[in-house]
Image: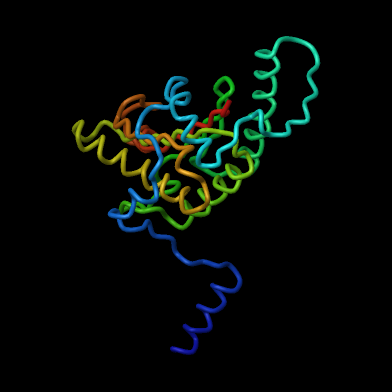
Amino acid sequence: MKIKNLFLALICITVSGCTTYHSPNRDTWGAYLRGASFDNMTETTRTAKRPVYLGAGGRTLSMVETNNKLEYGDKASNDNAAAVAYMSKLEFALYDALRKPGISVQRAGTDVVVTIVRDAIMELAVADISPDGADTLKTISKILQEYDATFIEIAGYTDATRDKHASSALSTDMAMRTAVFFAQHDIIPQRMFIIGRGSARPIAAQDDIGRLTNRRVEIRISPAR
């Protein structure tokens, strides 16, 4: 039996690399997220964060070869066109890679928003990222590495069945776990805005089905200018 179990373990590692991911100890999260902002991502906060982001090796759209040779129009129009083109490519990359239940990819102006219901990335009974969730977040991480001239807001949400303080704590935990995963997979924390919004901004009814949808992580990606 021991030989059989060892053989199965070797197959798992060799064929699928199926090592279960676990979030690191909470005491280490601060080190992983040093440089991240625990605030809403707005134009003002992005502008304030820009020097820190650039100092950590971050890139803006002007540093990226977009292959858009725009000769007419003013600079603002050209910059906006370049941002739209860049974010469109990012949107399609995410959409093609994330065709899974519980995940949606949408445009919001020049931003791209990935919405992931909690059960699609987290264990059902414990506060940790599931194996399927780790695969999903790894896929997102690779795309964010490629489209690195962006800021990222990671927002956690819960349903309305808990009091305000518990909802805030749970939603912040989801957001931070996701951010730590990204930091472990080569996304610099200086790109990140992390926030728990509790039961605010529900996107479904507060019935049994709707609550599952309202428990979610939203990853909002904005061009860095």
Its colouring scheme is: rainbow
What residue appears at the point 45 percent right and 46 percent down from the top-left corner? 120
Q: Where is residue 159 in the image (x, y as percent from the top left)?
A: 30, 33
Q: Is residue 24 left or right of residue 64?
A: left
Question: Foreground residue, 79 or 40?
Answer: 79
**In the shown orientation, is residue 5 left or right of residue 26?**
right
Q: Within the image, what quadrant is residue 71 found in? A: top right
Q: Quadrant of the N terminus?
A: bottom left
Residue plotted at (66% across, 23% down) = 84
Q: Where is residue 44 in the image (x, y as percent from the top left)?
A: 43, 20
Q: In the image, 186: left or right of 169?
A: right
Q: Position of residue 118 (x, y in %)?
A: 39, 43
In the figure, 204 relative to 19: above or below?
above
- Name the foreground residue: 78 vs 19: 78
How many numbered discs? Answer: 0
Q: Which residue is drawn at 36% across and 24% down?
A: 201
57 shown above or below 133: above
* Position above or below: 68 against 29: above
Front residue of 72 and 85: 72
Residue drawn at x 31%, y 51% is 127
Residue 27 placed where, x, y %? 28, 54
> Which quarter of the rendering shows the C terminus?
top right
